[in-house]
Each structure stands twice: as structure tokens, then as C-alpha cells.
Image (spheres, rainbow, N blue to C red):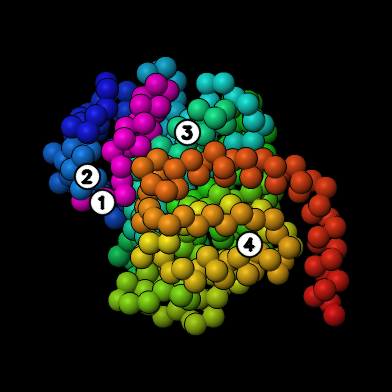
Amino acid sequence: MEFTKDTRIKDILDLPCFRQMNGQFIASSAGDWFCGKGELSLDELQRQNPTWYWEDVAYGLSRLQEIALGGEQYVYPVREGVCLIRLPAENRKYQEYAILNAGGAYGAVCTMVESLPVAAKLNELGMDCFCLNYRTATKDSFARGLMPKPLEDLAMAWKTIKSKEMLFDLNAERYFVGGFSAGGHLAAMWGTENHGARHFDIPNPEALLLAYPLIGLENLAGPAAQLLRTGLLGVNYAQEKLAEYTASRQIGACYPPVYLVQAEDDDTVPKQDAADMETALNKAGIPHCMERVPAGGHGFGLGTATAAGGWVSRALSFAVDSAAYEIHARKERIDLWNCTQSK
């Protein structure tokens, strides 16, 4: 099937080759996000969400369709309500692979519009990818809190990949983690000591690729701020929990290198988040690249129609170079960090 601006969501969901997806192109623990959206075309979906460019969505869907028509398994269950979507590169050029976490304010995982197009681009560049549909908020979350369930899902996803190293023909320890918006918060937290990879006895990713990420819960303002904090931490959360789940407050010498891209006209995530992240990375001596583009808004995903166009290629170059650098520099940096903190 050729995906165009007139392709309806219903047409996508009904494709036999996409049965493994079980409709979870935009996943939500609270129910079917696509309910009532079936008659919308990709162009109409973009009109409702202006940064969801239909051309980028079609590009990602086309790549997934190529894989699906091959007849092999491409969706792997991780736990109930959680799955990995595997997109192997046709001509793999890199030993590393990427796990991508779409955003959706922790109420949905917008895989179709964010992580899937980026995975397709990374495939084109020669890298294997996995898109993770993690658990999101439910009514119970606003009483008890969602965290750390998405982090547990990412840990189990990595262990799923590890268990299938031979099948996937990769080294599970050679990986990057990427994230968009709320998925960027998940990815940023994955680098921390308190709730990240090392907390689960999993090797650190070699780099983090963050697109317009939420970094923490402290800079949020307005009615949505309290809603998000309550949904993530529960109705009776303690104030110290805000710092505990703010990645910029948890950065030490072992934190992975970071590439971060954000548009100046993004009015969803506080600009202070990226500034705090940059300050913390500088203090800890972590290699990083902060790319700020003049326009693009929030949620642009692959972003080919924005000033951020091409960011995936730039991010990949940074990540690969940083991974090579880290092999030689990390021990020296950790020793320096420990010495500084002991004074």
C-alpha cells in the first residue's frame, strides 16, 4: 500500500501485514487512542496536530510495511501491555542499535508519529532499531503514581533484546536510547544512577538521543503541571520526589553522552529544562551536543519540514563518535569526579 496524505487511519489499522501491531501505533494503557479517529486521513491528523507531518508518518509506515511484508515476527511482547517493535536495517553499518521511546505526556506512546519515522531514518543510515511501547497512566496512576513502571518496562525490554542476541544478530550491550518529549524524560532518566540502567544491573547506553525532552518535574507550570506530577508520582507525593525524577539533578560521572535537539518556539516543555541539563552535563564533564533550532514547535519527530531537519543524522554522528571517545575517557572522568566530590 502507498501511504499518502489521504490515507485514513482505518486503512492503516486494517492492513493484514500490520496485525502484529494490534492497533498499537499510538499506544495507551487507558484504552484505544485511535477510538473515533479511524476516519481521519494523515493530512487531517496533521491539521489536528500541526507538528505531526504526514510525509514523515508515511515514511515510517512504509518502512514498517516493508519489514512486515517479509513475513517474520517484528513485534515482541515484553510484558502485558508492553511491546518492542523491531526495525532491522537492510544494510547494517553500525554495531550499535537504538531503543526509541515516543512521547505522549505519559498518557500515550505516539510511536507512529515520533519513533517510527526516526527508526526508519536510522534504518536508512544503517542502524537497527526498536520502538518501545511502554506503560502509561491509568486512573490508578493518579492515586498511586505511574513511576517507575516505564523505567521497569525499558529494563525488561533491554533484557528481552539480550535474550535474543543470536536471533537479532547483535550485541545487546552496544546500544543507544532515544526519546521524544515524555519519552525523552524516560530516556534521560535511563542514564541516572538512581532509576536508570545501572539500577537494574544493565550496562549504560553508549549515548542518549533526546528530542524536545521533558527533563524533570520541577520547571513545569500551569494546570497541566500538577496533573502530570500527580499522574507520575501519585496524589500524595513528597516534594523530594520531584528532584528524584528530574534527570538534571541526578547526573554524575557515569552519565552517558547526550545529544539534545529542541526548537526555540517549543511552548510545551520549559526551556529551563534544557538549560538545567546543559549545566549539569558541563559540571559532570559529560560529552554533549545541545542543538537549538529557531522553529519547529513540539512533537516534530523526524522533523523534515522544520528547521531541525537532518537532526537524526547529526545525532547519530555525535553518538557514534562519543561512544568511541567514551571507551578511553570514562575512567579518567570518573576518577576526577570522585576526587572533586570528596573535597
Q: Which amino acid does label 2 sit on?
A: Leu
Q: Which numbered disc flags the more N-terminal residue, 3 or 2?
A: 2
Segment colored magenta: 48-68
Point out residue 304 in the picture as x, y percentages from the top left corner.
40, 40
Helix, strand or loop at label 2? It is: helix
Gap between marks 1 and 4 measured at Cα: 32 Å
Point out residue 123 in the picture as x, y percentages from the top left corner.
51, 29
Point out residue 9 in the picture as x, y percentages from the top left corner.
21, 36
**Residue 131 seen in the figure:** no
Q: Which amino acid does label 3 sit on?
A: Lys
Helix, strand or loop at label 3? It is: helix
Gap between marks 4 and 2 measured at Cα: 36 Å
The label on residue 121 is 3
Where is residue 93, by image quadrant?
Answer: top right
With respect to residue 201, does 66 lie above or below?
above
Density class for disc 4 (Cα within 10 Å; few <14, some 14-19, many ≥20) is many
Point out residue 36 in the picture as x, y percentages from the top left corner.
15, 46
On the picture, is 64 further left or further right than 284? left
Residue carrying label 2: 45
On the picture, is 207 further left or further right than 232? right
Residue carrying label 1: 49
Whether the residues at callouts 2 and 1 have beta carbons within 8 Å, the answer is yes
Helix, strand or loop at label 1? It is: loop
